[in-house]
Image (cartoon, grey):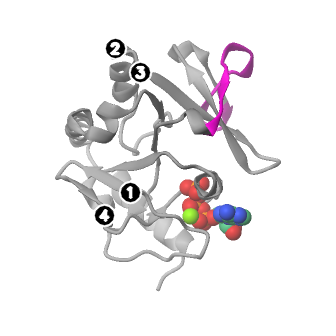
Amino acid sequence: MIDKNAFRKKMKEKLQATPKAFYEHYSYQIAQKLYQDTFWKSAQTIGITISNPPEVDTYQIIRKAWELKKTIVIPKCLPKEKQMDFRILERFDQLESVYYSLLEPIEEQTKRVDPNMIDLLIVPGLAFTEDGYRLGVGGGYYDRFLQNYHGKTLSLAFHVQMVKQLPTEPHDLPVERIITNEGSFFTS
Ligand SMILES: Nc1ncnc2c1ncn2[C@@H]1O[C@H](COP(=O)(O)OP(=O)(O)OP(=O)(O)O)[C@@H](O)[C@H]1O
Ligand SMILES: [Mg+2]
């Protein structure tokens, strides 16, 4: 089986070839499916990342959550420990660009939440299998976080991100549920 980095490169190229109009349409379809989902409906505090195209757009999801008075928490990477903290985001101007184009919550303006407070974690990834295994961007941040996280997990993916098989290692942890522009399913 080909290695993770080769797989990442291939998937990024595939996703980058998606025309903007389709990217917007599929992201909208995924968001609409999410809003009907019981994981979403029953979650008060939701962990989510700030998307960077070609990842599924999360800005519209964050705005919707705010409208519904849900609490949105966003990861702040702690590169020394290779851990993440989740902090409450109330406005997009509480974000700053730390690494490249990655946006993170500004520490002075946002409050950290305990992982136990997160009801639903929307876990990012480049590719997924039907049993919930995930290829992330390669930091291992989510794999580490998921080890001690006990809330619900869900991933959002374009249909092309669903693959038959992925290179996995013992530390890779699956997500419980996946929503794509074509459907939603439990992974086990
Ligand atoms: N629970 C863990 N404990 C220690 N090291 C870990 C753990 N999880 C992952 N790692 C390390 O992190 C590195 C990246 O892992 P991997 O390739 O699975 O990243 P990824 O799943 O793409 O990233 P992410 O989880 O942030 O989406 C690997 O070197 C792996 O050994
Ligand atoms: Mg992994």
Disc 3 marks which amino acid?
A: Lys
Left or right: 78, with 21 as reference point: right
The residue carrying mark 3 is: 70
Label 2: which secondary element: helix
In the image, the segment drawn in magenta is: 98-115
Query: Upstream in the sequence, badge 1 or badge 3?
Result: 3
**How far is mark 4 from mark 3, CA to CA?**
29 Å
Query: Upstream in the sequence, badge 2 or badge 1?
Result: 2
Is residue 124 found inside the magenta-colored segment of the image? no
State the image coordinates of residue 44 (x, y, percent, origin top left).
Answer: 42, 27
- Taking the spot 33% from the left edge, 33% from the top edge, the residue there is 42
Mark 2 crowdedness (10 Å alpha carbons): few <14, some 14-19, many ≥20? few
Q: Is residue 137 visible?
A: no
The residue carrying mark 4 is: 162
Disc 2 marks which amino acid?
A: Glu
Q: Is mark 4 within 8 Å of ligand 1?
A: no
The residue carrying mark 2 is: 67
Label 4: which secondary element: loop
